[in-house]
């Protein structure tokens, strides 16, 4: 009868190998078992964080076909529903003619029938980064939109938008760097909004206030592109409200979409029906204090909130706006550039 037993030395080596493999299997299973509660705890924590932001309840809703017109709503101090503007003398630029979407009798405008500048231009060279250094949030951008298209500028004479606004400016790449406080604090009193950049959205494009060169409601009067943007005379592409493409993608109760130049966040906040807040739900700077996700954690803090009605994003600065080096380079050497469009 054949002897299938291993010699003593080989038997010992086999037994050691078997025990090692068994230990790895058992140990691995134990590790997986121990990891499961941790993974479940993380998932639960994420769920609790999301649930901590309670559904928003607004005082009303804005009809997109009859948005209150913001013309004349410029103030020299903080006031709900107004732009506290640093500039009170306007040069009369902007759109040449009022569009058919503006109802001067009811002092409203219709966002559903407003003409947009033609074109669907994408910008593969768009570059936007956010980094944290100490107590600062550093934003760098070339001011070209990431993932959001633009129209064709200058506006073509055969574009229907041309009869209202002949914007002759091109979209040019910029070199912009903003250093904002990571944890902003309110100033002793709110401050006015300048013409030109007052913030930046997370697609890399700067935000201007809600006023055009004539002191009117820029969103209602000026013919912007499919994402509510257009360039000024310095070829700086910008928005006066949230880009349409970004607004359509945001569906939750509280989503960070950009930063004002005092460091506070700009959020899209919807109620259970998808409505944005109204001016009546916000303070004079167009913000409020409520739980939001900020710097990776849930914080009960002040922030700006996007609305469908004027002034759309900011009414004034709640915190202290920072001074930006790129603004100090203007006017350009040898000539004074025209004011922002």
Image (cartoon, grey):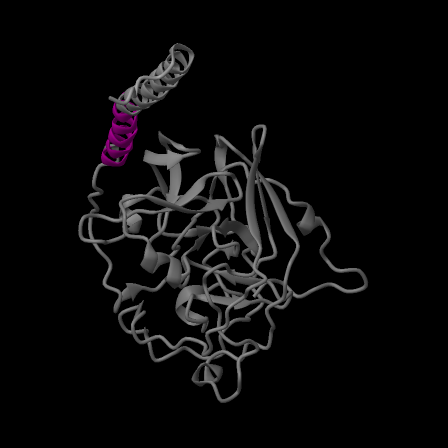
In the rendered view of the protein, which quadrant contains the C terminus? bottom right
Is residue 182 toward the left or the right of residue 265 in the image? right
Give coordinates of residue 177: x percent, y percent.
63, 47
Vertical order, 179 against 19 (above or below): below
Nearer to me, 203 or 289: 203
The stretch in magenta equals 34-51
Residue furthest right as drawn? 334
Residue at 77% over, 65% down: 335
Residue furthest front as drawn? 1
Residue at 35% over, 42% down: 283
Give coordinates of residue 127: x percent, y percent.
58, 55
In the rendered view of the protein, which quadrant contains the N terminus? top left
Dominant secondary structure, magenta: helix
Give coordinates of residue 272: x percent, y percent.
18, 48
Determine if the magenta segment contains residue 122: no
Q: Is residue 102 visible?
A: yes
């Amino acid at each position: 009868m054949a002897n299938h037993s291993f010699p003593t030395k080989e038997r010992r080596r086999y037994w050691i190998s078997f025990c090692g493999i068994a230990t790895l299997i058992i140990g691995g299973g134990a590790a997986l078992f121990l990891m499961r509660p941790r993974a479940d705890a993380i998932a639960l924590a994420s769920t609790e964080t999301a649930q901590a932001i309670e559904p928003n309840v607004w005082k009303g809703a804005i009809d997109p076909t009859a948005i209150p017109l913001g013309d004349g709503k410029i103030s020299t101090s903080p006031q709900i529903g107004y732009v506290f503007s640093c500039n009170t003398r306007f040069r009369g630029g902007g759109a040449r003619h009022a569009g058919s979407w503006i109802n001067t009798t009811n002092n409203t405008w219709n966002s559903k029938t407003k003409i947009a500048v033609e074109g669907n231009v994408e910008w593969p060279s768009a570059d936007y980064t956010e980094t944290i250094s100490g107590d600062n949030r550093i934003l760098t951008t070339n001011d070209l939109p990431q993932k959001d298209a633009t129209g064709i500028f200058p506006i073509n004479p055969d574009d229907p938008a041309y009869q209202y606004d002949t914007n002759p400016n091109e979209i040019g790449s910029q070199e912009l760097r903003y250093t904002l406080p990571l944890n902003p604090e309110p100033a002793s009193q709110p401050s006015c909004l300048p013409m030109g950049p007052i913030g930046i959205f997370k697609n890399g494009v700067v935000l201007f206030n809600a006023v055009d060169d004539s002191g009117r409601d820029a969103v209602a009067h000026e013919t912007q592109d499919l994402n509510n943007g257009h360039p000024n005379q310095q070829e700086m592409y910008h928005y006066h409200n949230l880009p349409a493409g970004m607004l359509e993608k945001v569906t939750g109760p509280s989503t960070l979409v950009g930063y004002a130049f005092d460091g506070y966040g700009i959020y899209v906040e919807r109620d259970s029906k998808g409505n944005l807040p109204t001016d009546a739900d916000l303070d004079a700077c167009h913000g409020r204090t409520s739980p939001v996700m900020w710097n990776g954690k849930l914080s009960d803090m002040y922030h700006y909130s996007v609305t469908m009605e004027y002034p759309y994003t900011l009414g004034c600065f709640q915190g202290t706006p920072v001074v930006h080096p790129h603004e100090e380079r203007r006017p350009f050497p040898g000539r004074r550039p025209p004011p922002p469009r």
